[in-house]
């Protein structure tokens, strides 16, 4: 019996599609929506047709299971993750070519050479695969119909399948738009938390710098000069942390900056007579690329901020030693002694999490803290290639 004759009328499918679109409009897990689409199409065929939706992976290289409620689980597992490429069954080929691929007999078609055995073993003999296309033409996945016997579609079959494929595309695009919105909101909240963190840090730094300057100054003029100098140095350090907002950021593009220069700029607001002792040692040829300068400066800025609030840089008796070596990785040791008050691990806040995220997330490195009675050692290890 022809596929179209097994459907309970074109109008019924339109009604079912409208119901599914209503579900898409009000939301719901993508897998549930895809399953309902498939079951709606399969039901009138009384088990003759088995449908499947495969989704293109984030990297665009593979097809992963979206929904296939009626296909054998063993078969779904076998095709989950197949490459998007010509010759990879009906679906891999359809996704690669962005065109329908109709295989009427899996047993003889060369596209199924690598997957023929697993299909035949589960009684699958025909597979019609349609690419699911986004509104911009990008391939989102494939919608496939399997049959237990060799079978060729007629024009009506293709028309109905095409309509269902468009419905599936709407469901997938809606899901991805919702994911993108959720991600954007997550980023927005992260930026707000970081902004709040930065504003609080500004006040903490200003308090520390004013206090340090006041201890050194013998008169108002000396005090004013010290404060202006430290604020100027702090501004230069901020430019390294946020190069995208400099007046001429293009000038820095593609320029590798010595790590020693970055460290000195970040620490310059605290390097004044009567302040904490700062020692910086390491190979002069260690450099940071333009694309990584923001993350590296951010890490050092956060360490310096913590040290200025309640570490070695908050005390005139404090000693900060920053030293590094480089082989296949950069090994940097940030060592504080004579701290005003050592922040214990449970006191770590957004700044410490920001450091950890930058080291591990951006650079793929590692960070370790060793808490001492009068200070702390922070050890960073960052692959040289990441710099």
Image: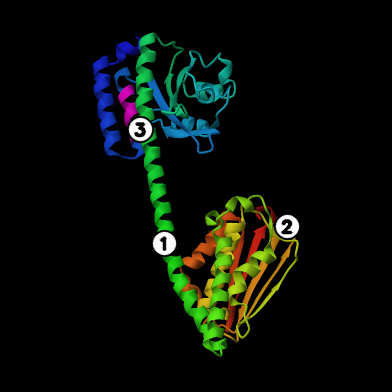
Magenta stretch, main secondary structure, is helix
Instruction: Based on the picture, tell me whether residue 35 belongs to the magenta stretch.
Output: yes
Question: Does label 3 or label 1 sit earlier along the sequence?
Answer: 3
Image location (x, y in percent) of residue 378: 61, 71
Determine crowd level at label 3: few under 14, some 14-19, many 20+ residues with C-alpha closer than 10 A: many
Which residue is under mark 2? Answer: 328
Q: Which mark is residue 171?
A: 3
Determine crowd level at label 2: few under 14, some 14-19, many 20+ residues with C-alpha closer than 10 A: few
Q: Are marks 3 and 1 in contact (CB under 8 Å)?
A: no
Question: Does label 2 or label 1 sit earlier along the sequence?
Answer: 1
Q: Rounded to the nearest whole Å, what is the CA distance between mark 2 and mark 1?
A: 35 Å
Say left or right for 371 vs 257: left
State which region is magenta: 33-41
Q: Where 238 sits versus 247, above or below?
A: below
| Figure quadrant of the N terminus | top left
Question: Does label 3 or label 2 sit earlier along the sequence?
Answer: 3
């Amino acid at each position: 019996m022809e596929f179209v004759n097994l459907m309970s009328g074109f109008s019924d499918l339109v009604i079912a599609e409208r119901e599914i679109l209503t579900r898409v409009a009000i939301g719901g897990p993508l897998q549930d929506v895809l399953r309902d689409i498939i079951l709606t199409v399969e039901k009138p065929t009384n088990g003759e047709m088995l449908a499947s939706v495969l989704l293109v992976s984030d990297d665009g290289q593979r097809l992963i299971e979206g929904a296939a409620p009626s296909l054998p689980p063993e078969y779904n597992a076998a095709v989950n993750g197949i490459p998007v490429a010509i010759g990879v069954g009906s679906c891999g080929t359809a996704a690669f070519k962005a065109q329908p691929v109709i295989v009427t007999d899996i047993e003889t078609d060369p596209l199924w050479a690598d997957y023929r055995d697993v299909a035949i073993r589960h009684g699958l003999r025909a597979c019609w695969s349609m690419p699911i296309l986004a509104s911009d033409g990008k391939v989102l996945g494939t919608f496939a119909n399997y049959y237990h016997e060799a079978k060729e579609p007629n024009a009506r079959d293709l028309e109905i399948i095409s309509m269902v494929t468009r419905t599936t595309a709407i469901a997938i695009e809606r899901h991805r738009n919702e994911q993108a919105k959720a991600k954007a909101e997550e980023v927005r909240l992260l930026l707000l938390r970081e902004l709040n963190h930065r504003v609080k840090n500004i006040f903490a730094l200003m308090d520390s710098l004013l206090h340090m300057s006041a201890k050194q100054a013998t008169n108002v003029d000396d005090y004013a000069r010290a404060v202006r100098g430290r604020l100027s140095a702090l501004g230069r350090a901020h430019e390294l942390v946020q190069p995208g907002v400099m007046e001429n950021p293009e000038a820095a593009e593609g320029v590798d900056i010595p790590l020693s220069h970055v460290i000195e700029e970040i620490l310059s607001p605290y390097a004044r007579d009567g302040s904490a002792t700062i020692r910086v040692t390491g190979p002069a040829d260690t450099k940071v690329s333009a694309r990584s300068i923001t993350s590296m400066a951010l890490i050092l800025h956060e360490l310096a901020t913590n040290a200025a609030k309640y570490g070695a840089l908050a005390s005139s008796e404090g000693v900060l030693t920053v030293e590094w070596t480089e082989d296949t990785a950069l090994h940097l040791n940030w060592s504080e002694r004579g701290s005003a008050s050592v922040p214990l691990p449970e006191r770590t806040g957004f700044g410490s999490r920001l450091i950890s995220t930058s080291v591990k997330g951006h650079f793929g490195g590692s960070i370790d803290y060793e808490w001492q009675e009068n200070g702390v050692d922070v050890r960073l290890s960052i692959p040289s290639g990441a710099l």
